[in-house]
Amino acid sequence: MEDFKVRMFKMEPIRVRCRSCGKEIKASAGKPVCCGCSNMTTIKGNVISAVDMAKVVMLNTYNAADYDVSLSPSELEWQEKRNKRKVRKLDFEDRSFK
Ligand SMILES: [Zn+2]
């Protein structure tokens, strides 16, 4: 079981998706929330835990610097999002060029 501490700078609840079962879970004040599958993706307060954190996708749009622990799965996720943004930007530039 790995723990992933998230420092909350915004008031929106932490949201993650469990890749193992595909379920999206959202932090709930005062009680831990679990996706219910064997990966045991759980949000308790500002701590996300799972049997395999590589199967947990962060859904909140925080900067990677907002996280206490630098874990490769979330970093990969940010990388993916950044790449998608780059593609959109290029599409936009193509349109404006015509
Ligand atoms: Zn799950």
Image (spheres, rainbow, N blue to C red):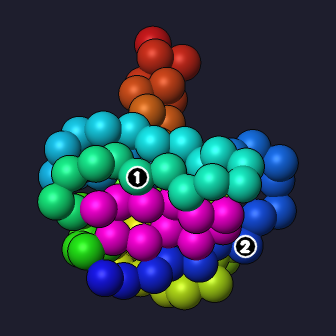
Circle 2 sits in a helix, a strand or a loop, which is it?
loop
Q: Earlier in the sequence, mark 1 or mark 2?
A: 2
The numbered dot on residue 34 is 1
Residue type highlighted by circle 2? Arg
Circle 1 sits in a helix, a strand or a loop, which is it?
strand
Q: Quadrant of residue 2?
A: bottom left
In this image, 12 relative to 86: left or right?
right
Q: Residue at x 39, y 38 (%)?
A: 24
User: Can you say whether 91 is above or below 67 in the image?
Assistant: above
In this image, 8 relative to 79: left or right?
right
Count residues near mark 1 (Cα–Cα under 10 Å), then give few for <14, some for 14-19, many for 20+.
Answer: many
Magenta: main secondary structure:
strand
Q: Which residues are magenta?
A: 40-50
Residue under numbered circle 2: 7
- Residue, far top: 98
User: Looking at the image, do the residues carrying marks 1 and 2 touch, with CB atoms under 8 Å apart?
Assistant: no
Residue 14 point in image, percent of width and height: 61, 51
Q: Is residue 17 magenta?
A: no
Of residues 40 and 66, which is closer to you in this image?
40
